[in-house]
Amino acid sequence: MTSMPLYGLVLAGGKSVRMQQDKGSMDYHGETQREHVAKLLAPYCEKVFVSCRTEQAAIIEPGLVPLFDTFLDLGPAGGMLTALRAFPNAAWLVAACDLPYLTNASIEHLIARRNPLKVATAFHNPASGLPEPLLAIWESKSVHRIFDLLAEGYDCPRKVLINSDCEILAAPFLAALANINTPAEAIAARKALSVKPSVKEV
């Protein structure tokens, strides 16, 4: 039962306070992370959108399709709700823009084990001991659970995974779940990936 189309959503609307620059504009692979993650999702999704704030419009690269937040000040949940409400008949492969170690292998593992009868399919993150919401497939029905948790005062997508009927998988590649939040972490990631920035970072 996977008749519902799968769309891709690159979460790139954060304010990147700790990084001190836009994380979607960071370069670990010779292109911005917005571009890189969108390209990773594209082979598996009918459409791919970049979740962002309206004030980021000027920095979205040509060829990418922005989806501007209509649910404001909710962090990643706002971008996800925007997508789920804009296209209610689609499931969403959601990936944060700050995952430089993400590869096709992890995406394919997730898709192959997708359970469309559940609210979402996600990896267990051993680093936190919790399910990882920002590399996951969110079924269309998840919009109701997100709203339910918002009504209870929770805007964290992880709370939705914890408190809903979800398919939680062991992560085959733990590095894929490592998000990069600070300049020091970015330097370490570039060293590990053996790359130097080749695009202008915003």
Image (cartoon, rainbow, N blue to C red):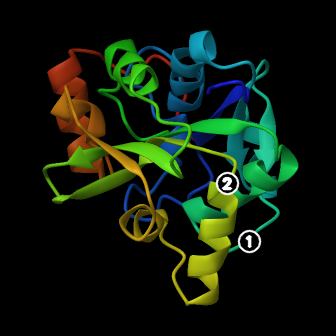
Q: Is residue 71 left or right of residue 159?
A: right
Question: What is the x, y in percent for residue 109?
Answer: 34, 21
Q: Which residue is disc 2 drawn over?
A: 141
What is the quadrant of residue 98 in the picture? Answer: top left
Q: Which residue is disc 1 drawn over?
A: 72
> The residue under label 1 is which amino acid type?
Leu
Q: Nearer the viewer, residue 146 or 4?
A: 4
Q: Nearer the viewer, residue 142 or 195?
A: 142
Question: What is the x, y in percent for residue 131?
Answer: 30, 54
CA–CA distance in space, label 1 to label 2: 21 Å
Q: Residue furthest right?
A: 86
Q: Earlier in the sequence, mark 1 or mark 2?
A: 1
> Where the N terminus falls, by quadrant?
top right
Q: Give the structural element (helix, strand or loop) at label 1.
A: loop
> Where the C terminus falls, by quadrant?
top right
Question: What is the x, y in percent for residue 72?
Answer: 73, 71
> The residue under label 2 is which amino acid type?
Lys
